[in-house]
Image (cartoon, rainbow, N blue to C red):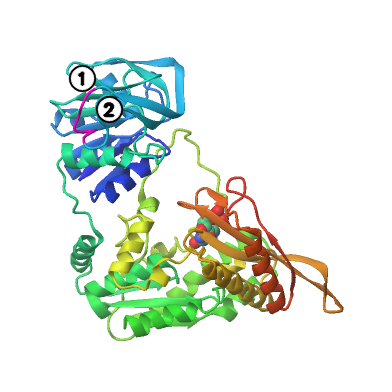
């Protein structure tokens, strides 16, 4: 495996993405815990990430000395290169000439890092982001590439197998960067491409069996991809020691609840308890318009209903479940490095079932903790989940309740559900579903005047939203062709009673968020 030591760069996760794509297992750990992680993992290679810090700042972070003493290959990226230089006896200074964004490097020496990618004497585009630069190299290092702003754009000590690059190979703006990282992992560290989802499936099945023994596991299915993949994997490991619970809060999209129930019961033959709690949820939401209050009500009720169901299952004579399965993903687990110190503000409380395990006093089974979202999708396909399910757009836990600004009523939910289904149908027909990261409709608490046939209407406005994104943290609105929007709007207004006007949301995130509430 490879250990990635995180010094707080915005793009550290991408290093892990690129290595995993190259079939290599790696873990990210913040520099504060790197020493322990290094001792525990005994990695075959180490990568030092970039950072917003400067090596000349007092108290700026360093890599554990053990990393350089263990005889394993090390690759320093940007700040990682600079701290390696500073720690091994070179000199780094804050430079007047800063390089940000696109730059070009000239390859001066052949190196296993460049093999099959960049030849000596050629010039290549890279993405830089640095103010500091290396002024003098430690013993044993030589320059292998230069750029206008960085005479040490890439350096190597081929004997000790220490490498440094001033640019960021992990971002797509360094077109051959992924190949460079794969060279580090395969040619320099010597790892094989054995991180595949079929290998992961086998390993995890063993691990789950070991953890759970003869115990029982409960899994809350949300209707989304993560909990479904976790449940199918666990069922493969321990069979009917697993019971799934699907709480239908009545805030799902059209047919979504039925699809989950039939997929699990009929297709996979997995024991599933489905609870129809729509009246309870919608009743409690009546007249509530504050978005965070909606989330709290939904999160709290979910725990109540789930807890009550768990008690019923516990009294079925087969023993009380002691484990709770969750579809936690790797990005939720990575500890982030913060330089600002203070707590960040809560924009929205997303993790509305977070209180479940503590309140129920259960041990967690989290078989997806090591995976990124696209790896979960690949694992889902590997496990035989249908493509149409695995490729689903993300859907928020509080469901349609946060797509109805203002109070929630059954009538409004019905209108929104119908309109949303038509919109998604048009997106699929246009072949855009997989290009768009998330698309949905929002029913506005605004009425406007229209004319249909010979009559006046005074009905609701529907807003359509579609975004492209990688991880939901930032997003761009999707630039539809106007003909598409016209087609979708006409169908919605003709087919859904209660809507007489459709608008399209052209806000990116930031400054907007993806959902309206
Ligand atoms: P925002 O609106 O914060 O959304 O830009 C980012 C992603 O998170 C989803 N989202 C939620 N998911 N519970 C969830 O499980 C929530 O309360 C929640 N709010 C937003 C949203 O759909 C998008 O994919």
Q: Is residue 57 visible?
A: no
**Image check: 420 left or right of 359?**
right
- In the image, is residue 339 above or below residue 397? above
The Cα–Cα distance between marks 2 and 1, rounded to whole angstroms, is 10 Å
Local crowd at mark 2 within 10 Å, few (<14), some, or many (≥20)? many
Q: Which residues are magenta?
A: 109-115
Q: Foreground: 308 or 210?
A: 210
Secondary structure found at label 1: loop
- Can you give x and y, in whole percent of width and height, for residue 436 in the image? 51, 59
Return the disc, 2 or 1, that comes first in the chain's sequence.
1
- Can you give x and y, in whole percent of width and height, for residue 138 in the image? 22, 16
Residue 141 disc label = 1
- In the image, is residue 239 above or below residue 97? below
Q: Is residue 121 visible?
A: yes
Circles 2 and 1: CB distance less than 8 Å? Answer: yes
Secondary structure found at label 2: strand
Write down the quadrant of residue 114 in the picture.
top left
- In the image, is residue 150 above or below residue 264? above
Residue 164 disc label = 2
Ligand 1 is within 8 Å of the C-beta of the residue at disc 1: no
* Magenta stretch contains residue 114: yes
Q: Foreground: 108 or 73?
A: 108
Local crowd at mark 1 within 10 Å, few (<14), some, or many (≥20)? many
* Magenta stretch contains residue 21: no
- The kind of secondary structure the magenta stretch mainly shows is loop
- Can you give x and y, in whole percent of width and height, for residue 86 in the image? 29, 19
**Image check: 349 left or right of 325?**
right
Q: Residue at x 46, y 20 (%)?
A: 98
Q: Residue at x 29, y 62 (%)?
A: 367
Q: Quadrant of the image for the C terminus?
A: bottom right
Q: Residue at x 49, y 73 (%)?
A: 304
- Can you give x and y, in whole percent of width and height, for residue 96 in the image? 46, 14
């Amino acid at each position: 495996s490879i250990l990635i030591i995180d010094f707080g760069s915005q793009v550290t996760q991408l290093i892990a993405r690129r290595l995993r794509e190259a079939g290599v297992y790696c873990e990210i750990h913040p520099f504060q815990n790197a020493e322990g992680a290094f001792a525990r993992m005994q990695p075959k290679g180490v990568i030092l990430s970039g950072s917003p810090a400067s090596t000349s700042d007092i108290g700026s972070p360093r890599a554990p000395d053990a990393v350089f003493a263990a005889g394993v290959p090390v690759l320093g990226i940007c700040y990682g290169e600079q701290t390696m230089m500073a720690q091994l006896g070179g000199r780094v200074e804050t430079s007047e000439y800063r390089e940000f964004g696109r730059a070009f490097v000239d390859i001066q020496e052949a190196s296993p890092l460049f093999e099959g990618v960049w030849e000596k004497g050629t010039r290549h585009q890279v993405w830089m982001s640095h103010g500091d630069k290396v002024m003098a190299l430690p013993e044993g290092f030589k320059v292998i590439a230069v750029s206008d702003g960085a005479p040490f754009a890439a350096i190597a000590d081929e004997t000790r197998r220490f490498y440094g690059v001033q640019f960021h190979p992990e971002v797509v703006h360094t077109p051959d960067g992924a190949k460079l990282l794969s060279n580090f992992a395969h040619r320099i560290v010597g790892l094989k491409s054995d991180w595949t989802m079929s290998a992961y499936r086998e390993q995890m099945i063993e691990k789950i069996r070991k953890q759970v023994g003869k115990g029982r596991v409960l899994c809350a299915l949300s209707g989304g991809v993560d909990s479904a993949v976790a449940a199918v994997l666990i069922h493969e490991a321990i069979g009917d020691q697993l019971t799934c619970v699907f709480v239908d809060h009545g805030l799902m999209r059209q047919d979504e609840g039925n699809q989950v129930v039939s997929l699990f019961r009929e297709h996979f033959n997995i024991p599933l308890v489905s609870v129809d709690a729509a009246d309870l949820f919608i009743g409690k939401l009546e007249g509530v318009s504050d978005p965070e209050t909606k989330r709290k009500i939904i999160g709290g009720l979910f725990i109540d209903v789930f807890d009550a169901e768990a008690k019923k299952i516990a009294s079925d004579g087969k023993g009380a479940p002691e484990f709770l399965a969750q579809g936690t993903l790797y990005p939720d687990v990575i500890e982030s490095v913060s330089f600002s110190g203070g707590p960040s503000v809560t924009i929205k409380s997303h993790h509305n079932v977070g209180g479940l395990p503590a309140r129920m006093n259960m041990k967690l089974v989290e078989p997806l903790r090591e995976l990124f979202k696209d790896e979960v999708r690949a694992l889902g396909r590997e496990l035989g989940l249908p493509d149409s399910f695995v490729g689903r757009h993300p859907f928020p836990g509080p469901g349609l309740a946060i797509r109805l600004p203002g109070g929630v009523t059954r009538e409004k939910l019905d209108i929104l559900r119908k309109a949303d289904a038509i919109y998604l149908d048009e997106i699929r027909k246009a072949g855009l579903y997989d290009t768009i990261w998330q698309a949905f409709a929002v029913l506005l608490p605004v009425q406007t005047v229209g004319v249909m046939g010979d009559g006046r209407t005074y009905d609701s406005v529907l807003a359509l939203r579609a975004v492209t994104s990688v991880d939901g943290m930032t997003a761009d609105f999707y630039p539809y062709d106007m003909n598409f929007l016209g087609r979708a709007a006409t169908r919605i207004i003709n087919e859904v009673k209660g809507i007489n006007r459709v608008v399209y949301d052209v806000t990116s995130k930031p400054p907007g968020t993806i959902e309206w509430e």
